[in-house]
Image (cartoon, grey):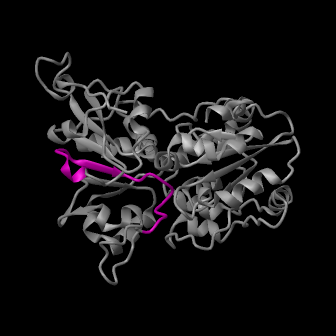
Amino acid sequence: MTVRTTGPALIEQGHWLTRPDRKRVLVVVHTLTFGQRLKEVYCLLERDIRIQVAFTVAPHAFGSGVPRHLERLGITALSWDEARRTEFDLALAASSRGVHELRAPVVRISHGAGHIKPLTDTSAIEPGEQRWPGMLNPRHLVHEGRVVPTAIAYAHQHDLRELASSCPEALRVAHVVGDPCVDRITTARPYREHYRRALGLKSGQRLVVVNSTWGTTSTFGQLESLLPHLMGQRLDGRCRIALLIHPNVYAGHGDRQVRAWLASCSERGIAIVPPEADWQPLLVAADWIIGDHGSLTAYGSLTEATLLLTPDPRREVAPSSPAALLATTTPVLSPAHPLGMQLEYAARRRRPDQYRRVAASLSSVPGEFHRRMRSLIYRLLRLGEPAVPPDVGPPVAPPPLKRWVAPPGAEKWL
């Protein structure tokens, strides 16, 4: 899809603009996942009449769904070439790719629950070099000897201790602001029954959410063993199942192909949640969450759901990550036993504080993300903050699960 551009009006401070001389902030969207995370940040700014927020789609292997996503939000994006040629007062990014080319101070935010996956591209690693994950890796923060971001936003105080070992030169620009998903899910928990009614769950029905990150060691990477286990076990009518697949899976394989692979699930009433949907209400509404080492499973520790992990001894996660901690406290699903029996057993064995340490590892300042993030950005823009608190409400209610289940005969269109 071709990204529509704004033309000169948005990027020139001349007679084209009705309201010139605004502070200009560029939102750099590499992937759908990054765009969803960045929304928590740019929504703090766009109502301020002193600020003009612009968007661009940066090159990325998993960026295929981004233009369509932005258009659904009513956003017209600058081309990447325009964005690189234009000066901005600030740029917001959830990835390091290409941001060193921008003519703006860069604020770098994370896009998941901690820093889970060690560096996967080992082609340029020196012998003995440690494969630091995510925003702890100097390869994601430093370009040609220079720390690129003007500010780096971390979720937890222990991130700074790790950063002191991995990239000490970046400590001077590091800030602990918390995690927006932690705060949204916490705000949403009192609305659990509301979300369940919106999903169409009847009294006594229970919801199983199966989530997958991307990559060969993910739940979706084990598709051949996952599907028979979900469909071959008899769950009575009191259970509904929803699949939450990482947007990078759709971007990497194509939306049509992923839905074709999952067609047999849809035909049996399993809901396939679209990649652009808000996943937070589903986690809050769930009775069980079955997942892998991805962020959504870790965020499930904040809910009332019982967690189970899909088995894969090949998984590689950073030892200090919430995912590693979760692996020591969460039962593992077995393909040799009935699914329903394992769900019930795990629910009976769950302790009230079983995931407390995992939840605590996600943010050291719970409830503070939006306030701290806004203060950081306005300080960098040299503007006074609005005299009202950030508006942080619970996620909106999801559509009914039946909307995400293919109707009879839909497979012929795949």
Q: Determine whether, in the image, residue 380 is placed left or right of residue 236.
A: left
Number of marks drawn: 0
Q: Quadrant of residue 171?
A: bottom left
Q: Determine whether, in the image, residue 253 is placed left or right of residue 176.
A: right
**In this orientation, which residue lies closer to the viewer: 302 or 143?**
143
Q: Position of residue 284 (x, y in %)?
A: 67, 44
Q: Residue at x 16, y 37 (%)?
A: 86
Q: Residue at x 19, y 42 (%)?
A: 84
**In this orientation, which residue lies closer to the viewer: 148 or 71?**
71
Q: Position of residue 96 (x, y in %)?
A: 31, 55
Residue 205 sits above or below residue 308 on the image: above
Q: Residue at x 39, y 40 (%)?
A: 41
Q: Quadrant of residue 342?
A: bottom right
Classified by dominant secondary structure, the portion drawn in magenta counts as loop
Report the residue that reaches farthest toward the bottom.
Answer: 128
The N terminus, quarter of image: top left
**In this orientation, which residue lies closer to the viewer: 392 or 290?**
290
Q: Is residue 385 visible?
A: yes
Q: Is residue 404 visible?
A: no
Task: Give the magenta part as a residue range.
Answer: 99-118
Q: Position of residue 402 (x, y in %)?
A: 72, 31
Residue 402 sits above or below residue 146 on the image: above
Q: Position of residue 184 (x, y in %)?
A: 55, 42
Q: Residue at x 72, y 45 (%)?
A: 286
Residue 268 sits above or below residue 396 on the image: below
- Look at the image and say whether residue 132 sits in the magenta stretch: no
- Look at the image and say whether residue 101 sits in the magenta stretch: yes
